[in-house]
Amino acid sequence: MSRPTKASPERGTARLRLLEAARDLIREKGFAATTVDDLCRVAAVTKGAFFHQFENKDALGVAAAEFWAATTTAFFAAAPYHEPSDPLDRILAYVAFRKAIIAGELAEVTCLVGTMAQEVYASSPAIRDACGRSIFGHAATLVRDIEDARRAHGIQASWTAESLARHTQAVLQGGFVLAKAADTTELARESLDHLDRYIRQLFHIAEDRV
């Protein structure tokens, strides 16, 4: 997928347009504040078409999380951070790539599933779980490179590749919260600078690498 953009009513099926509308509106307004009327207006569909596709708004929320997972998986699979031959360089390139794509309005660069998980973790377990599958599924894509880097650099420590992969997502999601609180993407980018330094310290390497 290209970087998330505003939904285009002229493109795709009613379901796709509703999912794109959900992606954009929920990141802008939150899940609770996004109404079915809002979704139908942006997607240029009728309410009847909405309820033909989704039983209710929660069902749309689950589908939106799954849509986000599928489209972002394709986006990150094609990203250039996979290119370095050294696994540690790939990890650092991943962090640099995540920083590089934080450019634009907050609603366009923050995470849909992180936004929904924070809001509905207690009120909608189905949406929460769908968001969790997306976040933890993405973290899992980093595990092999981290484990390979541990072996290559002889790192013997109590932390695991899985725990560091999850920590990268904690930094990203926390950075997005700070960015929203201060209304500036710079705090999210700052968080990734610190993540880069932290990973370098874990692997005992200099800051001028990659």
Image (cartoon, grey):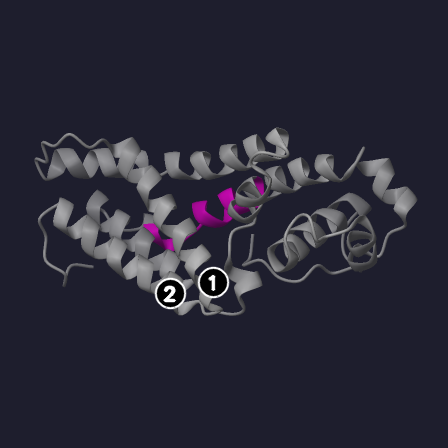
Indicate which disc residue 187 carries. Answer: 2
The residue positioned 50% from the left and 42% from the top of the image is 73
Q: Position of residue 34 (x, y in %)?
A: 72, 52
Q: Bounds of the magenta span?
A: 70-81
Q: Position of residue 15 (x, y in %)?
A: 77, 43
The residue positioned 70% from the left and 59% from the top of the image is 7
Main structural element of the magenta stretch: helix, strand or loop?
A: helix
Q: Nearer the viewer, residue 26 or 91?
A: 26
Q: Dot 2: few (<14), some (14–19), or many (≥20) neighbours within 10 Å?
A: some
Question: How much space separates mark 1 and mark 2, taking CA atoms?
Answer: 10 Å
Judging by the rendered image, the residue that carries numbered circle 1 is 181
- Snapshot quadrant of residue 66: top right
Q: Nearer the viewer, residue 5 or 38?
A: 38
The residue positioned 44% from the left and 45% from the top of the image is 77
Q: Amino acid at mark 1?
A: Ala
- SS of the residue under disc 1: helix
Magenta span contains residue 2: no
Whether pointer 1 and pointer 2 mark residues with C-beta atoms closer than 8 Å, the reply is yes
Q: Position of residue 45 (x, y in %)?
A: 86, 52
In the rendered structure, the answer to whether residue 191 lies left or right of residue 34 reads left
Magenta span contains residue 80: yes
Q: Position of residue 116 (x, y in %)?
A: 58, 45
Q: Amino acid at mark 2?
A: Leu
Instruction: Residue 86: tell me if it is visible.
Output: no
- Looking at the image, is mark 1 or mark 2 earlier in the sequence? 1
